[in-house]
Image: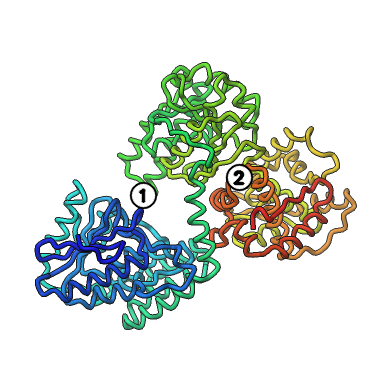
Amino acid sequence: MQTVTDKVGVERDGDVLVILIDNPPINAGSLSVRRGVLESIAMLADDATLRAAVIIGRGTTFVAGSDLREFGKPLEEPQLPAVIRALETVAKPVVAALHGAALGGGFELALGCDARVALPGTLVGLPEVSLGMIPGAGGTQRLTRLVGVARSIQLVCSGERIAADKALALGVIDAVADPSDDADLRASAVRFAAGMTGKRRVRDLTVPPDAPEAIDAATQAALKAGRGRPNVRDAIERVKAAASEPIDAALARERELFQHYRIGEDAAALRHLFFAEREAGKPPEDANGEARALRRVGVIGGGTMGAGIAICLAEAGLDVVLVERDEAAVNDCRARLHEHWAGRVRAGRCNAERASAFEAKVAVGYDWASLADVDMAIEAVFEDMAAKEDVFRRLDATLRPGAILASNTSYLDLDTIASFTDRPGDVVGLHFFSPAPVMKLLEVVRGTHTSDDALATGLALARKLKKQPVVARNAFGFIGNRIYDAYRRQCEFLLEEGALPQQVDAALETFGFAMGPFSVADLSGLDIAWRMRQARAASRDPNARYVAIADRLCEQGRLGRKTGAGWYRHPEGARRGVPDDAVQALIIEASAAKGIERRAVDDDEIVRRALGAIVNEASKLVAEGVATRASDVDVAMVHGYGFPRWVGGPVQWARQRGREALARDLDELAERSGAGFVRGDPAVLV
């Protein structure tokens, strides 16, 4: 092989030049890669004995994206559009040989070639919008010429990855190679290139016609999913421009917008989150265990959470043994599982055969002996220590040596739970979020005695389930719920001082939260937090400020949507809660009982204090070692609690806010919160 740059080499295969990109682990489109491909194309142009070229990646992938580390600083020449211009300008055809993934700039590079040949299972897509940008090297223009405006809006704005078979059906790739190995991909691509009689530039194609209704529907869906962010709007306009503007002008405008967004706050925050997510999946430096094999997993409890966990396990290919308390509960659980997969079939998200296969992987019963040969058992019963004790004593007596005992507890002391067994080293926390089949976050909780192997197994399971893991040390509420408790408490202080639930929710949703705290409480059920408060009542500082409004609602049977009323009324069929005069009267009464003179509270104060409470609690968690890294807080809050991705998480928000502003925020927080407020040191975050 002839070296072109340290990341690119070339070889001759007959009269075809094979350009090999070698920039592990993902062959990111770095400066050295761009220079190497550009120089290789010049070699193709200058050598009269060559008739075509193939671009292929070494290792496990084509080019799975650009080097994100370059995006926060000036880009050096040649930039990707110049490389693609060379591909289109050279008189000889160039074929992209795709395997693994061709994403972002890698997919744009492939679209700049004259044809694309892929191994089965290869994924292609344009994730730039999900990273706060828009495609910047022709993605909006060339993809639209292949699939039309409506489909291109959907693909560009969602960042959807599509597999080779689907890409072939859409006309995005030209051929699927023999699936046996990468050598066959190269051979297939070389044969394809050698058989080409001329150029097939995507830029020369006419955009396929779409019905205006289809374009409008795709536009509205993308704006809704993208929360109306400016880059989403501009991505849509650039896709539509493919059908109306000369391509060179459209490409120039696309690049201009890409350059604008890549150095913006959204893109910086989303890059931060991108790297934080990858770090969060790693074990702490002092944990070096090997994951144990998992083939068969037990679940104890078949309610909403237990059934949801079983669904996740089955869809990941694991055999599941689910144990309930009696025949009636077994039948309820089976019905719950069946309805889940039947609903997926009705929605067109799963075919009937596949749904039936998933359902068959879950054996539901009430005989604990069926757990004897599982590799892991996950407890998902009532959040009550006595209930946990009964389960873990029985698991300890039933499970084989070496099996993992996991608890889905969201608040309770994992070390106490582990003490109910004679093998605390095999006990780990696996805190799933509801609904488990939808929510990505999985807190992997490390107790005092949790072995490195048990921790590694929890992380391996998260990856197998395609969840986003975050490691937490054992502490009340771990990372997410402890922070959320401080956030919710501060929002309740605001109610006593003059705000109402609908104002607090609206202010925080405008900031970017998926739902405000009072809407969330009604959705999840007010009784969950109520039981937690009751369990901790004896240990609560009697001098600390405590808001009892939620307790009064629960005492009245207002437990949220499931009872038709909570912080809001929930009329039959209503999508959102309706403000309730009875709740307003209860709040005003609570303020008066404490002698608090109600005042006007503006939205800025709501956001400032709510986020200040989150940041303050996060700083304490990091200082205490409950969170391994400050960035783990961002991952937990974004994936588990609806914190806006484009802000990057509360730690990223705090860094952008700066030390002086944070200090003022915490001064205000301390003054308003009164006795019981413990101030953290945000220096550990910023």
Kindly identify the amino acid type of the residue bearing the numbered disc 1: Gly
Residue 144 rendering spot, x and y as whole percentages? 32, 70
Please name the residue shown 43% across and 78% down the image: 256
| Count of marks overlaid on the render | 2
Q: Residues within 10 Å of mark 2 (few under 14, many from 20)?
A: many
Q: Residue at x 26, y 76 (%)?
A: 86
The colour scheme used to paint the residues is rainbow
Return the x and y of residue 162 as percentages of the image width and height.
32, 56
Please say if 2 is above or below 403. below
- Asked if residue 179 shows in the view, the reply is yes
Q: Secondary structure at mark 1?
A: loop
Side (left or right) of 642 relative to 584: left
- Residue under pointer 2: 627
- Between residue 266 and residue 601, name the one nearer to us: 266
Q: Earlier in the sequence, mark 2 or mark 1?
A: 1
Asked whether, in this view, residue 54 is left or right of residue 122, the answer is: left
* Quarter of the image that includes the C terminus: bottom right
Report, in whole angstroms, how far the alpha carbon at label 2 lies from the one at label 1.
40 Å
- Which residue does the numbered mark 1 point to in the structure image? 348
Q: Point out the frontmost of discs 2 and 1.
A: 2
Taking the spot 18% from the left edge, 72% from the top edge, the residue there is 44
Q: Is residue 316 left or right of residue 395?
A: left
